[in-house]
Amino acid sequence: YFAQLYKNGQRTTSLAFTDLSKTTHIPNIDPELFRGSQIAALCGALPLFVLSHVIAASSLAKILYDYHQMPQILWWLASSFVSLGLLAVLWIKNDKNNSYSSIAKVRWVEILAILFGVSWGLCPTIFFASADPGLRVLIIGVTLAIAAVGTFALSSVPSAAILFSGIITGLLAVSSSALGAAIGIVFAAFTIIFGVVLASMILNFHRSQLQKAIDTQELRQQNEIIGLLLNDFEEGTSDWLWECDAGGLLTYASPKLGEIVGKSLPELRNTTLLQAT
């Protein structure tokens, strides 16, 4: 079981961090359309992430003001809100400007995920040393909450979500282990496990989205094939083919029927078969 789980995780991870345009083992997926759907889903989840980021960062900065010098807090806030501004630029450009490819936008999201991850991962690194135990618990709680909210907000772009959660949980684990004692080591291990669980959930979600995209494309191709076969059948048959609605009016007529009655297809629509002949 664990061997199969590792194999699936390795395969899905490689897909998450690889451009679909460069993969040859993912059939029936249009890379640009799939990446475009990822960006559209991301933009739909951004308001939640932005709101949680602003509330958490502002509230935490206000609490930290009583324990730290203002320059430290301002530098930390600046790093987090600069990333927020770049995210807003991406949001606006996605609505108004389609000159950039979807893959380029995905790379932009990954860079922003790294910036956000570093800014929130540095929070415990900067403020743990001089904080009392109660404040440390608050910093840990807020950081983990942001890691969870941000990871799921970025889940439509799995590489960005994994980078974001990995950086935050990794830096938080280092900060926790630096505290020493058994509780610091235990919490560092718990943080790492938390990051692995988040990454696993994102990879499973990404795999399901890939399969959904493949199924949708295969269904579209099957419908196209069926449509071509019907057209070939209509062109090669001499039968009269028509379709009527509940009132007996023609909604569809084959070209052969139009040739036989001497009327064009638009003229046959919304008439009865008796009127047509």
Image: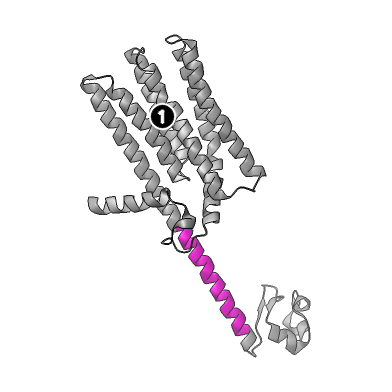
SS class, disc 1? helix
User: Would you say residue 90 sits in the magenta stretch?
Assistant: no
List x then y, in percent, for residue 162.
Answer: 40, 40
> In front: 193, or 74?
74
Which amino acid, mark 1?
A: Ala
List x then y, in percent, for residue 243.
Answer: 65, 78
Q: State whether residue 272 is above or below residue 30.
A: below
**Residue 1 in sight here:** no
Tell me the colour scheme of the image: one colour
Identify the residue shown where x is 49% and y is 60%.
29
**Residue 19 in sight here:** yes
Bin the neighbour count of mark 1 within 10 Å (Cα to Cα): few under 14, some 14-19, many 20 and up: some
Count of numbered circles in the view: 1
List x then y, in percent, for residue 185.
Answer: 24, 25
Q: In terms of secondary structure, what is the magenta stretch mainly?
A: helix
Q: Report the side of 40 relative to 206 (left or right).
A: right
User: Would you say residue 214 sits in the magenta stretch?
Assistant: yes
Determine the image quadrant of residue 257.
Answer: bottom right
Magenta span: 212-234
> In front: 170, or 191?
170
Determine the image quadrant of residue 114.
Answer: top left
Q: Locate the C terminus by quadrant.
A: bottom right
Identify the residue shown where x is 39% and y is 33%.
167
Q: State whether residue 270 is above or below residue 25.
A: below
What residue did someone put label 1 on?
Answer: 145
> In front: 231, or 129?
129
List x then y, in percent, for residue 213.
Answer: 48, 58
Q: Report the side of 100 relative to 163 (left or right).
A: right
